[in-house]
Amino acid sequence: MSLDPIQVMSGQVKELKVSPSSNGDTRGSWEEKEEFDPNQLDLTTKSKPVTGRRARKVEGAMFFPKPENAVTVAVSSRVLFRTEREQKVFEQKGVEEYLRYQIEHENEPFAPGPAFPFVKALEAVNARLRELYPQSEELFDIVLVTYNHAHVGIRLINTINHHNLFIERFCMTGGSSPIGYLKAWHTNLYLSADAEKVREALAEGIAAATMFMMEKVSEVSESQLRVAFDGDAVLFSDESERIFKTHGLDKFFEHERENEDILLDHGPLKGFLEALGKLQKKFYAKGQRLNCPIRTYLVTARSAASSGIRALKTLRAWGLEIDEALFLAGAPKGPMLEKIRPHIYFDDQMFHIEGAAEMGTVAAHVPYGIAQKHNSPQTLSGGK
């Protein structure tokens, strides 16, 4: 069984600490190599009933869409919930003690993780879609993916019920790679704490990104899903990024001017933006363009006049609408993202991820393209 420790940002955000929660303490990242204290973990304590458990509210006859008809978002349990404490038990005591600990604490719900607000926003969109299209299967379908043994499933189910989440589809692999299952689910997006598995998913053509634990998280809308994307190596290929990294900014501008009528190739997240656009159009068809619960953003370091035309022409040719486009001409993205307050922001460069996190934005790293050769290995701690 292979359970990698959650990756925690360092560099500009190396002071991130674990917030107090039902399954954590306040002593900082689990990456700190401190002495294991079994008394602190209270491994001998028997399970206690879940306190404050919410009754699941299901209005009408709930049905679940076929994977091929839905927009399927697969989320790792380690980014949907906070499991740092349990991860430490696994690392320091081994798999058997880890399973015993999970069983003994299975009535104690996990605290929300960085993907939690995003998932809640997906469910809010589903509620609106069901009101407008009661029989439609074009909905978000959330699949919980975990390396955990099935024994841990009871605690995960208890946690989902406690937080009143509508997640009925689980994939508990017992340490095996989930990539084959993601393809079977027709997955449109995979979010995980495991950068290696994210790279495997991208290699199989599945949109995927790595998420990180954060100390500071901004409040986000409960009624409108907001998703922000970088351009190059995220929505588009890394073709232009390669010119910039290899030949510099002037050559990049020249290349974009010469090729402004030639479409950029698609990047790893283009399909997910396309899926969001299809759901948006269902609201537009009901006259709810101005009240649409999905809003998308392009937040790019490109300059508008010098290199923006090609990006916009490419989106138009693909038939994709982006609600807002911010061309920052190299300015920091964090302050703009703080104003947008997206549920998630996708970028291929770690310094943009770190800058977003400093401002409280949940940002997910897309490890794709030439920029990965320039990302500093010190920007992340943890991993295998």
Image (spheres, grey):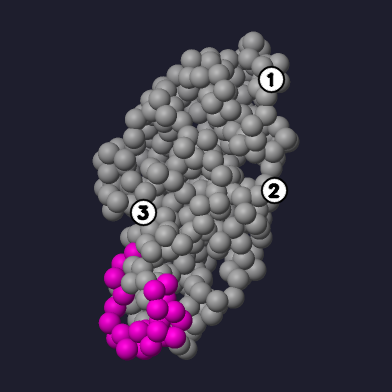
Q: Start and end of the magenta stretch?
A: 244-267
**Of circles 2 and 3, which is in front?**
2
The residue at which mark 3 appears reads as: 207
Compared to residue 105, the image places residue 217 above or below, namely: below
Instruction: Answer left or right for 103 relative to 274.
Output: right
Q: Nearer the viewer, residue 27 or 286?
A: 27
Task: Please provide percent x and percent y for residue 14.
Answer: 66, 50
Compared to residue 100, the image places residue 384 above or below, namely: below
Secondary structure under tag 3 reads loop
Residue visible at 42% across and 59% down?
372
Quarter-of-image position of residue 337: bottom right
The residue at which mark 2 appears reads as: 15
Three-letter amino acid code of the residue under disc 2: Glu
Among numbered discs 2 and 3, the one appearing first in the sequence: 2
Secondary structure under tag 2 reads loop
Report how far apart the C-alphas of labels 1 and 2 lie in the structure: 23 Å
Secondary structure under tag 1 reads loop
